[in-house]
Amino acid sequence: MKYGGSCSQKITNAVLSPETLEKTERHPCYSFGAHHKYSRMHLPVAPRCNISCNYCNRKFDCVNESRPGVTSEILTPESAMNKFDRVKEKINHLSVVGIAGPGDALANWESTGESIKLIRQVDPNVVFCLSTNGLMLPDFAPEIVELGVNHVTVTLNSLDPEIGAKIYRSVNYRGRKYQGSEGARILLENQLKGIEYLTQHGVAVKINIVMIKNINDLHIPVIVKKVKEMGVFITNIMPLIPAPGSAFENYPQTSMKDLNALRDICELDLQQMRHCKQCRADAIGLLNEDRSQEFTTDRGKVEETIAHQSSDAGRYRLAVASKHGVMIDQHFGYASEFTIYEGNGMDFELVERRQVEKYCLGVEECDTEETWRDKIVEALQDCDAVVSMRIGYHAGKRLAGSGIESLETCDTVENGLVQAVNILNGKNKEIA
Ligand code: CLF
Ligand code: SF4
């Protein structure tokens, strides 16, 4: 059907119920006509992310920055509900409650789902909106539909895993980290499955696409045609804003001229959003009048919560072979335990001591115990790097094959961690 709403070209195959259409009319992102009248509020209840996009560096508390993934605080579902109450009292026409990070809404499903349930109890008319990278959509789409969430945004930057490999540094899926086209393929398959489920169940799906010159720009019209066929409501082609500290920090920002030319082409197929403000993850108010600073509650909390994230751009998980936690004094092959740290080069947190089978079983078994070795690599699969005093050539190669960097050093644990982060940061810039 052709939707007769208020977006630019009004071309879409989306089939929406009268109830969803009514909600869409009060959604400032989905309906151009609503964006001067209706406000939205983002709940920053989702700190973790399960993929690493090369354009992302989730810094926080920078009030001058205005882009997705930036927030001044992290909320629990209960504090989110309290904040909703306060905001609702002060802001007229608050129609939409969205969850858009600062990580991924579905990588934090417990908090996301709980927040929706709590707010639904106090305000059954509010329009809920989620924004996700789509990796976990096949798992959670049925619950999203059951919870009555009628608006979901999925960021889909490519239909080709080879192009995706240039955009995504890694994809953490079911306890394993995937890189290159393998990771991009898993992400893509899940995105398409999830989008299909949502559109078939009457959800108004918006697709965000980050336009990156010489990487996916020429491919974007193909994405738009495909998602149109799938019943997507609208696409929002966004400019790449090179975030400092991200792998794409030295990439040129997409020009408005190029962006609008591409939107003009894509608008022949599907209606285009042209009024996106690339909001903060805690944005509140009209799209062009952010009032989030008026309502910030617990500014310190974001640091505490972000310290517990596992897969964040610029933040790494590192496995260290050390007998007493002071010096790096163990050979990788002889370590039965690794100390797992998380950090960004400045602060590190010890998160776990992990027992593993010893990698090296002696000369006789050396080339025969393939499964045994795989088990060790598997045990460290969620880590970005291993830091040890020495590591054998084959062990290092095996780790590298799983996307895990290895560093040899006899320094203190503290210095070893910093060295490892420097290597990882250097690598990520190379990828870009
Ligand atoms: Fe938020 Fe996104 Fe929902 Fe809107 S934002 S989760 S759809 S309520 Fe809107 Fe902000 Fe652009 Fe997003 S202007 S970044 S498109
Ligand atoms: Fe969003 Fe995660 Fe990608 Fe950052 S890494 S842009 S939080 S999906």
Image: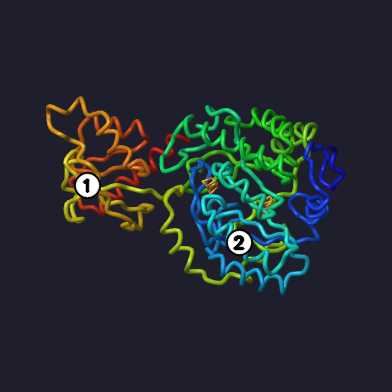
> Along the polypeptide, which appears first: circle 1 or circle 2?
2
Residue 432: image tag: none
Q: Secondary structure at mark 2?
A: loop
* Marks 1 and 2 in Cβ contact (< 8 Å): no
Question: The residue under label 1 is which amino acid type?
Answer: Ala
Q: Secondary structure at mark 1?
A: loop
Residue found at the very far left of the displayed protein: 363
Residue at 73%, 64% in the rendered image: 124
Q: Position of residue 244 (x, y in %)?
A: 50, 48
Left or right: where 108 falls relative to 359: right
Q: Is residue 333 above or below residue 144?
A: above
For the residue pair 165 and 359, the one nearer the viewer reads as 359
Residue at 26%, 28% in the rendered image: 370
Q: Quadrant of residue 1?
A: top right
Q: Quadrant of residue 62?
A: bottom right
Residue found at the very far top of the displayed protein: 367
Residue 43: image tag: 2
Q: Say which residue label 1 marks.
A: 321
For the residue pair 245 and 395, the one nearer the viewer reads as 395
Left or right: where 34 falls relative to 141: right
Label 1, ligand 2: CB separation under 8 Å = no
Question: The residue under label 2 is which amino acid type?
Answer: Leu
Badge 1 local density, few (<14 within 10 Å), some, or many (20+)?
A: many
Q: Position of residue 217 (x, y in %)?
A: 64, 31
